[in-house]
Image: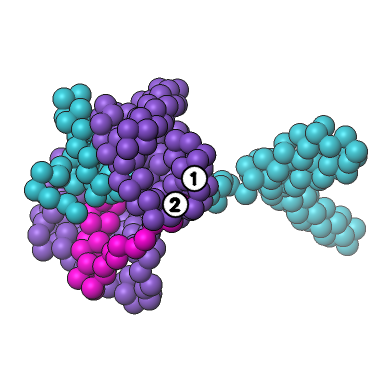
Chain colours: A purple, B cyan
Amino acid sequence: MTTEELLIKCVNHNRAAWDIFIARYKNLVTKSVRYKMTSLGVTFSQNESRDIVQQIFFELWTKNKLKKLRKVVCLKNWLTIVSLNITLNYCKEKTFRNSRKLVSLEKNLCRDDEKHEKNLLRKFLSDEKYNSARVLESYETLEAIKREISKLEYRRALALKLNIYHGKTQKDIAGIMNIPTGTVATLIKRSKELLRENLRTFYENR
Amino acid sequence: MKNRLCPSEENLSVYLSGTLSDTDRIFLEQHLANCQACRTLIAEAHSIARKSAGNKIQKLFHALKPGALWLTACIFSLALSFVFSKYFIQFLTAALLLGIKWIIDSKTTKTLITIHKTLKSDAATNKDETFINKNTFND
């Protein structure tokens, strides 16, 4: 059975087709749930992740969400995004809170689990003299970086944020934005230069 | 945090698959540059998709027929024999053995062996029959 046929049958609440749909996409949904829970730093048991997976499929069935899907090609991406959103809501309900902490200069701006040492906060400071133990000022710097990035052109800002905050490589960003890797490299390089210049001006004018 | 201005899950998935129209794309990228929640969602979905693509290679490897697997190993070993010239003979022998294994395991060889065995058994039966006939004739 093709995916298109399967989706049509699922939208019409065909039980057998729904079983096939679950069997086919259960792994992807489980993977998305676990990824989200890990990135949120939530400890979870096997049963808990199974519960969320069940909840996702239940919501898809009861709200007939598959009806909203217009392009079959995007099914996997769509299912991943839906799973991530439902997991996030589940975790929020479970009294998950993001506490605001003091920011260290050694803070890694990248939220992804992969290690990206080059994205340490202190490396974005304009000059070495600002690098001395000004840990308390680092929060201000963080805000300044955010503000300066927001001033950039939207494509530059997006590429830079994906690179710095999400730890994405140039190849990944090219995949997300659907543009050549060379263009991404230029965008990021120029954006970083601009950011450094702006930060230097910001510190000098302070 | 997501708000009402955030694009739908469907629009985000279409953007990720690279099939969004130019106008929508510009609008969505402008939003992504400012919305942390949507950007995180896109980045995470892309990571998962990339990991799944990695698994596809594994699946492809498992889906390879045993015959093709032997042939691949044979070619790989042959290539290695040239890369590591110190172990040229060892890798060459391995390639030879894997090649023999591939030939033996291939469907055509198996069919040929079956035909040969059938012919052999047929010949043996015929021989017995001739022997019996000869005996009968002698009697």
- Marks 1/2 same chain: yes
Query: Callout 1, which amino acid?
Result: Asn
* Quadrant of the frame with the N terminus of chain B: bottom left
Q: CA distance from mark 1 to mark 2?
A: 7 Å
Helix, strand or loop for disc 1: helix
Q: Position of residue A98 (x, y in %)?
A: 28, 64
Q: Nearer the viewer, residue A118 or B24?
A: A118
Q: Are marks 1 and 2 in contact (CB under 8 Å)?
A: yes
Q: Amino acid at mark 2?
A: Arg
Residue drawn at the location 21% of the way across and 33% of the way down? B30
Q: Which residue is mark 1?
A: A131
Name the foreground residue: A85 vs A50: A85
- Circle 2: is it few (<14), some (14-19), or many (20+) Cα within 10 Å? few
Q: Position of residue A100 (x, y in %)?
A: 30, 62
Q: Quadrant of residue A189?
A: top left
Residue name at image x 23 percent, y 73 percent: A95
> What x and y, as percent, mark residue A133?
49, 53
Q: Is residue A39 left or right of residue B121?
A: left
Decide: is A64 above or below A200. Answer: below
